[in-house]
Amino acid sequence: MMNSDQYRTSLDDGRTVYFDGQPVDDVREHPVIGPCATLVAQSYDRIGELYPDGSPFTMAPRSLDDLREANEAIRPLGIMTLLTYASMMAMTTAASRIEEASAASDFPDRIRGMLEDFRERDVRFAQCITDAKGDRSLAPGKQSDPDAYTRVVKRSEEGVWIRGAKLHITGASLAHELMVIPTKAMKPGEEDYAIACCVPVNAPGVTIVDTSTAPTPSERPQSPFSSTDSFPEAMVIFDDVFVPNERLMLDGEIGMAAIFAHSLGLWERVAGLTHMVDDAELLVGLAHLIAEANGLLKVSHINQKISDLIMHATMLRASLDAALSNGSQGEDGTMFPNELYTNAGKYFGASNWHPMVQKVQEIAGGSVITAPTLADLNNPEIGATVKRYMTGATADGEYRARLFHAIRDLTAGNFGGWKAVTKVQGGGGLYAQRIVTRKHFDLNAAREAALHATGLEIPSAD
Ligand SMILES: Cc1cc2nc3c(=O)[nH]c(=O)nc-3n(C[C@H](O)[C@H](O)[C@H](O)COP(=O)(O)OP(=O)(O)OC[C@H]3O[C@@H](n4cnc5c(N)ncnc54)[C@H](O)[C@@H]3O)c2cc1C
C-alpha cells in the first residue's frame, strides 16, 4: 500500500495541468490544488492505519453486511477514495456484464488483469464519462465536430489513439488513472465512439484544465465544509493519446457501450445518496443551532421548517437504508445496492435540496451572507464591537458568526453554489435517475392494484 509520502512523490510524474490559464508545474505546491493533494496524502496514511492488511475498498462486497460496512467506512476517507472504489466496482461489474453479453470477449480478462495491477499499485482514479457533447440534439456520429464525443482516431496492432475531451472530471489532477468510458449507448456507425479504457494521468497527449470552488487561504478558517470537500474538477483533453491493447476495456462493440456508464451509475448514485443523507442531517443541525442562537426556537413557523427538514433527512436515510438492505447478488457474487431505492432516493434528495436550503436560509437571516469575517472578529480595534453586535440569544458573538459562515459555506458561497449544481447534475442528472427509477418500479403491479381497487377492467380495443 502507498503511504502519504509515496503518494506525494507519485504526483511528480510529468502530468500536464493548467489552472486559471496558467500551467501548474507541481500540483503539490499549487495554492488551490496543493491542499487537496495533502488531504489525499493524509487519507492514504489513514487507510494504512485502519487497514494494515490492505484497503478493503478495492474488492467487491459479497454480502449485505459488506455493502453497508464499506459504504459507512469509506465516507470519512475522502472523495478520491470514494471515486476509486466506485471506479473499481464499476469495472468489476462491467467485466461480468460483458461476459454475460459475449462469452467470447477477452475484455473481461483484461479488465480483471488491470484491476489486479491497480490494487497492487494502490492507485487513485478519476472517472472520465461526460463528453463535450456539442449539439445535444445530435448523436455522436452526426456532430459537426467529430471529436465532440471521445473517439478512436487511429488503430494499430499494439493499440488505439483516442481524441476528445471529458468535462467536469472530479479530482483528475490528483489521480493516477483515468477510467475513460462512453457516456451513453452507441448506434451502428458509431463504433469509434464505443471506446472504454484506462489511461495514466501523465500519458502523452493528456491535458487537465482544472477549476475549483475551494476557499482562498483567508476564507479557509471560516469555511468548514469547502476546506476539506472542495476538490478540483477538470476538462480532460485527449489529444491523440495512445492506449495499448492491454488497457482497452471495449473497442468498437456498440452493443456494449452503455454497460460501463450503467455499471458506474449505480455505485456513483449510492455514494451520492449517502452524501445527500449527510448533507440533509447537517441542514437540520445547522437550522436548529442558528434558530437557537437567534432566540427563535419557540416560534411556530421556525419549528415547522425544522420539522420539514427532519422529514426530508429521515426519508433520505430510509432510502439509503432500503438501498443497502435490499441489494441483489450478481452471478460473480458481487452484492449490488438496490437500483430502485438508490435512484429514487438520490432523485428525492437532489430535487429537494434547493427548497430545503431555502428553509435554512429563511430561519437563519441575512447574516448568512453578510456576517463579518473571522479576521474582523479578531481585529484588535473593531473585533470586540463586531462580536457584541453579532451576539444573539447565546452570549457568544463569534459562535453565532461562525454558524453563519458555516451555513454560507454549505449553501450560499462558492461551494454552496457548487453543491446546488452538483446535487442536480452529479451522477448523470435528475433525468437519468428518473429513467432508472421508472425502469425498476413495478408499474404493472401498480396498474393491477388500481384496477383491483376500483373494480375496473381495461376496455378491450374493439
Ligand atoms: C461538480 C460536478 C462534478 C462532476 N464530476 C464528474 C466526473 O467526475 N466525471 C464525469 O464524467 N462527469 C462528472 N460530472 C458531470 C455530470 O455527470 C454532468 O454534469 C451531467 O451528466 C450533465 O451533463 P452536462 O453537464 O453536459 O449537461 P447537459 O448534458 O448539457 O444537460 C443539461 C440538461 O439538458 C438535458 N439534456 C441534455 N441532452 C438532452 C437530450 N438529448 N434530450 C433531452 N434532454 C437533454 C439534461 O437532462 C440536463 O437537464 C460532474 C458534474 C458536476 C456538476
Image: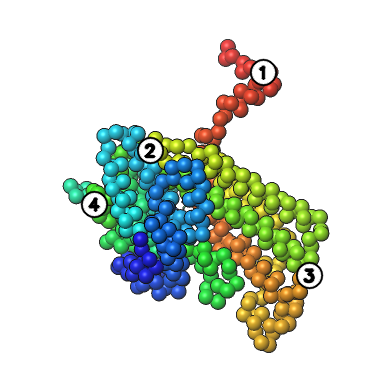
Classify 10 Å Cα crowding around label 3: few (below 14), some (14-19), many (20 and above).
some
Within 8 Å of ligand 1, the CB of disc 1? no
Vertical placement of residue 393 versus 386, above or below = above
Going by the picture, which residue comes out furthest to the left? 157
Q: Mark 2 points at which residue?
A: 332
Q: Regarding mark 3 in the picture, which secondary structure is present there?
A: loop
Chain-order first, disc 3 or disc 1: 3
Q: What residue type is labelled 2?
A: Asp
Residue 76 at x, y = what percent? 51, 59
Q: Name the residue under label 4.
A: 244
Residue 110 at x, y = what percent? 27, 45
Question: Does the residue at mark 4 contact the one at mark 1 (Cβ under 8 Å)?
Answer: no
Residue at position x 54%, y 65% from top? 226
Chain-order first, disc 4 or disc 2: 4
Residue 24 left/right relative to 369: left
Q: What residue type is labelled 3?
A: Ala
Asked whether residue 6 is in view, the answer is yes
